């Protein structure tokens, strides 16, 4: 299949970022996938790579691109196409009921529910990503999921650079800027224990994986605690901390500021 390259205007890029933010807040996963794919196409990433990253076929990504080019954002919305509703056999119904009753933990997931704090943190990371990319138009954002996958692959067969029972530390995201610098992004909305900060900073000190670490704090008090930890580890040249900009705080919400 022929590779497609398109150049998005700043207005189009900004429109898609806003749609992505609204989709995350609404929990609209299909729209999140579509817009994420289009933004990646606009950055010049190969369609095959984009498709693997979001779990679809390349032809699906091309279909989304065609819908967007011909119908705009409205063409990305999922619509019911009619047809007879799918039916489950009695055996399938029993199996589905058993899975639902057992819950996510029985299926191997680490937690049975999504806490409000975790959800708020994930939404904050999305807003920070959009904010950073708006200031680095030719930059590229790498998600925590991609970093975790790559980090686990790199950690196999070695003992160094691991935290939490062998799992490498993973930042909330990675910005690869216009010059190719790898900037790890951390978002901290609530204060943690000193040993938690120390563990993360020790990992950054020895990992040599990133050119810079940018920490966004939810309050001035958190910012001060992080700066104290950074000074203890003498990482002032590697790690910088700043309070979330006012426009981001307004988006994320006023609870807990």
Image: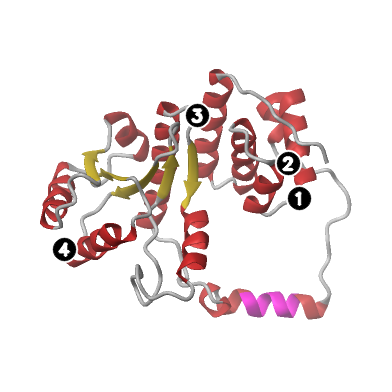
The number of callouts visible is: 4
Residue at 81%, 78% (x, y): give it: 90
Q: Can see residue 257?
A: no
Of badges 3 and 4, nearer the viewer stands 3
Q: Which residue is mark 3?
A: 138
* Image position, residue 17 (x, y; %): 52, 31
Inter-mark Cα distance, 4 to 1: 45 Å
**Looking at the image, which is closer to me, 63 or 203?**
203
Name the residue beneath numbered marker 2: 61
SS type, badge 2: helix
Q: CA distance from mark 2 to mark 4?
A: 44 Å
Q: Position of residue 103 (x, y in %)?
A: 55, 75
State the mark number for residue 194.
Answer: 4
Q: Residue at x 42, y 50 (%)?
A: 122
Q: Secondary structure at mark 3?
A: loop
Q: Could you tell me residue 22's position as x and y percent?
A: 51, 36
Quadrant for residue 11, please give it. Answer: top right
Location of the N terminus (image quadrant):
top right
| Horizontal relation, residue 23 to residue 124: left or right | right
Q: Tell me which secondary structure the magenta stretch mostly adopts.
A: helix
Asked if the residue under mark 3 is in contact with the one under mark 2, i.e. CB atoms within 8 Å, the reply is no
The boundaries of the magenta stretch are 93-99
Q: Nearer the viewer, mark 2 or mark 3?
A: 3
Residue occupied by mark 1:
57
């Amino acid at each position: 299949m022929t590779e497609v390259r398109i150049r998005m205007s700043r207005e189009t890029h900004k429109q898609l970022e806003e749609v992505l933010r609204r989709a995350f807040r609404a929990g609209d996963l299909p729209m999140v996938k579509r817009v994420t794919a289009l933004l990646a196409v606009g950055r010049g990433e190969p369609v095959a790579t984009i498709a693997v990253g979001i779990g679809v076929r390349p032809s699906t990504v091309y279909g989304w691109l065609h819908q967007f080019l011909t119908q705009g954002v409205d063409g990305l919305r999922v619509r019911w196409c009619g047809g007879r509703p799918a039916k489950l056999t009695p055996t399938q119904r029993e199996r589905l009921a058993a899975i639902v009753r057992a819950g996510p933990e029985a299926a191997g997931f680490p937690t049975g529910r999504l806490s409000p704090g975790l959800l708020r943190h994930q939404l904050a990371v999305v807003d920070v990503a959009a904010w950073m990319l708006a200031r680095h138009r030719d930059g590229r954002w790498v998600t925590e999921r991609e970093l975790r996958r790559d980090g686990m692959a790199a950690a196999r067969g070695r003992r160094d650079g691991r935290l939490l029972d062998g799992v490498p530390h993973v930042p909330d995201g990675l910005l690869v800027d216009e010059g190719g610098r790898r900037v790890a992004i951390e978002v901290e909305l609530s204060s943690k224990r000193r040993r938690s900060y120390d563990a993360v900073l020790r990992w950054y000190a020895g990992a040599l994986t990133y050119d810079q670490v940018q920490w966004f704090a939810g309050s001035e008090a958190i910012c001060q605690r992080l700066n104290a930890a950074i000074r203890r580890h003498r990482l002032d040249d590697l790690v910088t901390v700043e309070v979330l900009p006012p426009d981001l705080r307004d988006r994320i919400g006023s609870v807990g500021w």
